[in-house]
Amino acid sequence: NAGVTQTPKFRVLKTGQSMTLLCAQDMNHEYMYWYRQDPGMGLRLIHYSVGEGTTAKGEVPDGYNVSRLKKQNFLLGLESAAPSQTSVYFCASSYPGANTEAFFGQGTRLTVV
Amino acid sequence: GENVEQHPSTLSVQEGDSAVIKCTYSDSASNYFPWYKQELGKRPQLIIDIRSNVGEKKDQRIAVTLNKTAKHFSLHITETQPEDSAVYFCAGDNYGQNFVFGPGTRLSVLP
């Protein structure tokens, strides 16, 4: 039982490049989330999904796209990376409804130069 | 949507003393308030949570209190130990769809 696994753990991108972050969970959770963490700003929600095939925007969605084609996977895409997207990205999952524990992945440290 | 504020941003206590972190939320419809601990370089992990129908919850040295009328909740850590040093985040649910987190409190327990 691996919980929530993020791939990759570290990445350096050049401005304008694209990439996809993969989040996989093996707990059969319905809800999945992508957050970014910046110093002094806590965890800010980028996008979330309440079930397979669904996605919704969070607080800071600009510059990101997501897909949830399979229940266990939630992908975060950056089409044209910008230095402002330098951050630590966390994926999380929970049972239906944001009223139970959210389990986090180990994080992806992304640097855009 | 929900907005969560958290104070203080940094807190230093002597080992063995108590630590208190306070959060306020904006949406009276919120019903679930978890607290997460994040050690340096690690993922956030749940340490305690409270639901709107409960005023207080304890788990060994950790307790959380909730005042729904005032829309604030607090984390209390007693008999602090060096391993309590970390960043603590409070959160509230946003209409049951996702979690809104406070900006975090960096707790340092001094030996």
Image (cartoon, helix red, strand yellow):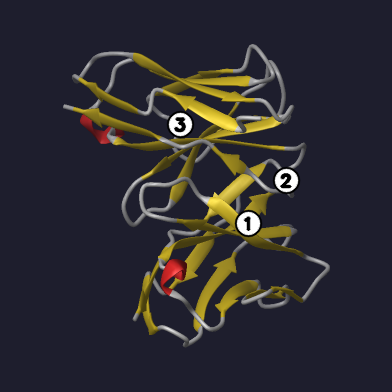
Q: Which residue is mark 1?
A: B92
Quadrant (top left, top right, bottom left, bottom right) of the N terminus of chain A: top right
- Label 3 marks which chain's residue? A
Given this view, does label 3 or label 1 mark the residue nearer the observer? Answer: 1
- The image quadrant that residue A3 belongs to is top right
Q: Which residue is mark 2?
A: B96
Quadrant (top left, top right, bottom left, bottom right) of the C terminus of chain A: top left
Q: Which residue is mark 3?
A: A61
Task: Give the Cα distance between marks 3 and 2.
Answer: 19 Å
Residue drawn at x 24%, y 26% as measured from the top left: A82
Vertical side of B88 occupied by A60: above or below: above
Residue drawn at x 70%, y 45% as measured from the top left: A98
Looking at the rendered structure, whether the residues under marks 3 and 1 are on a common chain is answered as: no
The amino acid beneath tag 1 is Gly
The amino acid beneath tag 2 is Gly
- Label 2 marks which chain's residue? B
Task: Give the Cα distance between marks 2 and 1.
Answer: 9 Å
Instruction: Tell me where residue B19 appears, x and y as whole percent.
Output: 49, 81
Q: How many marks?
A: 3
